[in-house]
Amino acid sequence: MAAAAVQGYKAFYAPKGTATTQSAIRTSGLVKYRQLLDAWADLAMQEDKAMLTEARSAAVGFGGAGSKDLTHFMELVHAKAKSAALKAKTVEVMNQFYNKVLVDNATTGDKFKKAYGLGVYLPGWSFDTNYNELAWAKDGKWDEFQQWLTAKDAAPAANTHATEGNIR
């Protein structure tokens, strides 16, 4: 039934040339998926933050509020990650998504060709602390990952040591 709804949505919008994405998921697969995603987040926070930021920026987005396609983001991370453990965990998370969570996904238009079925909070500028109130954030580590990813790195401390040029 869910797959029929997804395909019906696609059939309605495809002739109009409108860029759309619609998916159906099995909520029964989300607990294990979140557990794997938590382990992925731990590994990702040991990776190059600039690479992750670039992947976040390049991932397919859905309007405002920092909504991005999680699988596309992970695909981009997998392509550039240096850590073999992170690459392996990325594959495991994606396989869990495709095998146990996603029922069906359909897109129309070029804009969403890389939308694979699950939009997540991936803000580009700052973390909205209201996100912490969601059960997903309370139970998992996605919020910690987002806070880490959006944290502005501290500027280097000013050199207060005397140099030969300023000694009196």
Image (tube, rainbow, N blue to C red):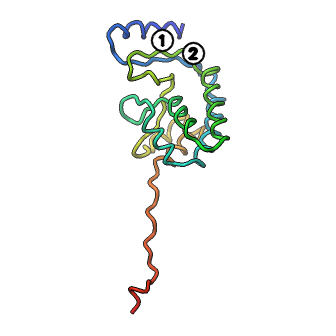
Q: Residue at coordinates 39% horizontally, 85% vertically from top-left?
A: 165
Looking at the picture, how far across and down is residue 57, in whole percent? 42, 38
Residue 162 versus residue 21 in the image, above or below: below
| SS class, disc 1 | helix
Location of residue 102 by image quarter: top right
Tags 1 and 2 touching, CB below 8 Å? yes
Question: How busy is the neighbourhood of tag 1: few (under 14 within 10 Å), some, or many (20 plus)?
Answer: some
Locate residue 149, reporting x and y percent.
Answer: 49, 46
Q: Which mark is residue 6?
A: 1
Specify the quadrant that holds the C terminus: bottom left
In primary-sequence order, the first of circles 1 and 2 is 1
Q: Is residue 142 left or right of residue 111?
A: right
Q: Nearer the viewer, residue 138 or 15?
A: 15
Q: Residue at x 52, y 17 (%)?
A: 24
Residue 48 in the image: above or below residue 31: below
Q: Residue furthest left?
A: 16
State the image coordinates of residue 98 (x, y, percent, origin top left).
60, 21
Residue 26, numbered label: none
Quick one: label 2, few (<14), some, or many (20+) residues within 10 Å? some
Closer to us: 84 or 134 = 84
Residue type (three-letter) at the residue carrying disc 2:
Val
Look at the numbered disc 2 and give the secondary structure of its residue.
strand
The N terminus lies in quadrant: top right
**In the foreground, 55 or 130:** 55
Residue at 43 percent of width and 86 percent of height: 164
Q: Is residue 29 above or below residue 134?
A: above
* Residue 103 - label: 2
The quarter of the picture where residue 130 lies is top left
Q: CA gap, disc 1 to disc 2?
A: 9 Å
Q: What type is the residue that disc 1 sits on?
A: Val
Residue under the point 36% across and 30% down: 63
